[in-house]
Amino acid sequence: MNKKIPVIPIKAAGQTDTTNDIMNTIIKISPYICILLAILLIISLVSQMMTSSEATTATRAKPTYSGNKSLDTLYTDAHGNDPSKAARMTSQISLSTDEYSCKFGVTYEGDNYRDVNCITGCSLEAEPAEDSENKENEEFCNQYRYSAIEADKRGNLLNRMLDDEYLNRMNIVNQGGSGGD
């Protein structure tokens, strides 16, 4: 009689089943794996959105409009500086930032009249009063005003709102850097 005797493996002290060890380790670190995968997914999505928006911007050509010009260029293109033409251009410019607030009415007439009338933000006189509450704002805004009639109401940045052709023709010193923006 050949009887088979079942063999039961006996483990030495401290020895465990390898499969159980692997499963226990996976269970212990699974929350960290999920967090890592979520972070990688977020990074991937952000990266994808950034590259797709850059690609869209790069493929879309920026439009150019014939009206995208400075006031002086627009006036010159319309032959406003031609003395034989009866030309007039008016524009209202409002500026408001955290530091300053000004509003101007700009008038070009023919080739020999320009006016930058300060509607709000400037002082009544050429220089703000010493006790003015808005002295800093008034000093800033006063730089851009220009009156063809009142010589004392001329700022020092005339070429920002007046065309160089007019300034040269009227022999007014062009003091403020590049103009016509």
Image (tube, helix red, strand yellow):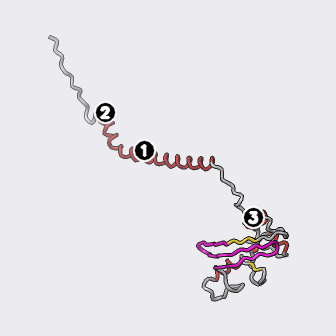
- Name the residue nearer the viewer: 53 or 66: 66
**Front-lying residue, 58 or 5:** 58
Q: Earlier in the sequence, mark 3 or mark 1?
A: 1
The image quadrant of residue 90 is bottom right
Nearer-the-camera pick, 128 or 153: 153
Front: mark 1 or 2: 1
Q: Residue at x 25, y 34 (%)?
A: 13
Q: Is residue 160 visible?
A: no
Percent across and percent down for residue 82 are: 83, 68
Residue 115 picture quarter:
bottom right
Question: In 3D space, how far apart are the residues under numbered discs 1 and 2 (Cα atoms)?
Answer: 25 Å
Q: Crowding at label 2, few (<14), some or many (≥20) Cα neighbours within 10 Å?
A: few
Tag in front: 3 or 2 = 3
Residue neighbourhood size for the residue with mark 1, other residues' Cα within 10 Å, grouped as few (<14), some (14–19), many (≥20): few
Q: Which residue is mark 2?
A: 19
Residue type at mark 3 is: Leu
Residue 76's place in the image compared with 156, above or below, is above
- Residue that label 1 marks: 37
- CA neighbours of label 3 inside 10 A, class few (<14), some (14 to 19), many (20+): some
In reply to whether residue 110 is colored magenta, the answer given is yes
